Image: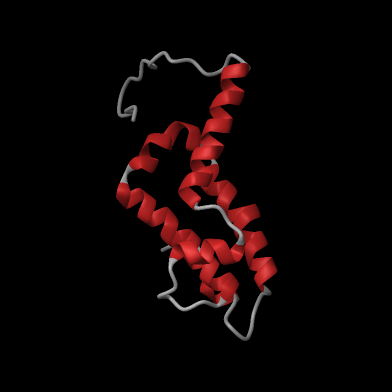
Amino acid sequence: SSGINTEYGGNTWGLKPKMIKWIFTSVARPIIEYGIAITCPALEIKSTQKKFRSLQGKANRMITGAYPSTALADLDFLTEMTDIIEHLKMVATRTMIKLYNTGEWTNEKPNYNGHVKTI
């Protein structure tokens, strides 16, 4: 499941495109952004990129009413959204800088016990 419910809008009915964009950028995307500074290395994996881009593409199609064959980059342009991977990298960088400036970010490897594994 992509997490975006297409029952809330269609080409001729449902929520207005502006509201769908607001829900994605103000509700769904912050959930995705949570913890991205830690999981940032996963953004280099092609299958992960494909999943994130597919999620944003689905939201963009709901906003624009575009056909499924419309290129994701074109949808990003039409909705004035940054590519989700670039956006997440920017959020991760900003978070790391904030943590570093407050002394909360270190380059030490944590000593995990049990099932936890570092990326």
For the image shown, how many numbered marks are present on the structure? 0
Left/right placement of residue 78 relative to residue 114 reads right
Residue most toward the bottom?
A: 12
**Residue 90 coordinates in the image, percent (x, y):** 54, 38
The quarter of the image holding the C terminus is: top left
Which corner quadrant of the image does residue 77 belong to?
Answer: bottom right
Residue occupying the point 49% across, 39% down: 89
Left or right of 103 in this view: 38: left
Side (left or right) of 69 relative to 74 = left
- Kindly identify the residue that appears in the image at 53 percent across and 45 percent down: 87
Question: Which residue occupies 69% across, 67% down?
Answer: 19
Q: Does residue 20 sit above or below 37 in this rendering?
A: below
Residue 39, percent from left and from top: 42, 36
Q: Is residue 108 above or below residue 70?
A: above
The color scheme shown is: secondary structure
| Place of residue 103 in the rendered image (x, y in percent of width and height, measured from the top left) | 59, 14
Task: Name above or below for residue 26 compared with residue 108.
Answer: below
Q: Quadrant of the N terminus?
A: bottom left
Res 43 → quadrant: top left
Which residue appears at 35% of the width and 41% of the height? 44
Residue 114 drawn at (x, y percent): 30, 24
Q: Which is nearer the eye, 81 or 119?
A: 81
The part of the image, by quadrant, that contains residue 42 is: top left
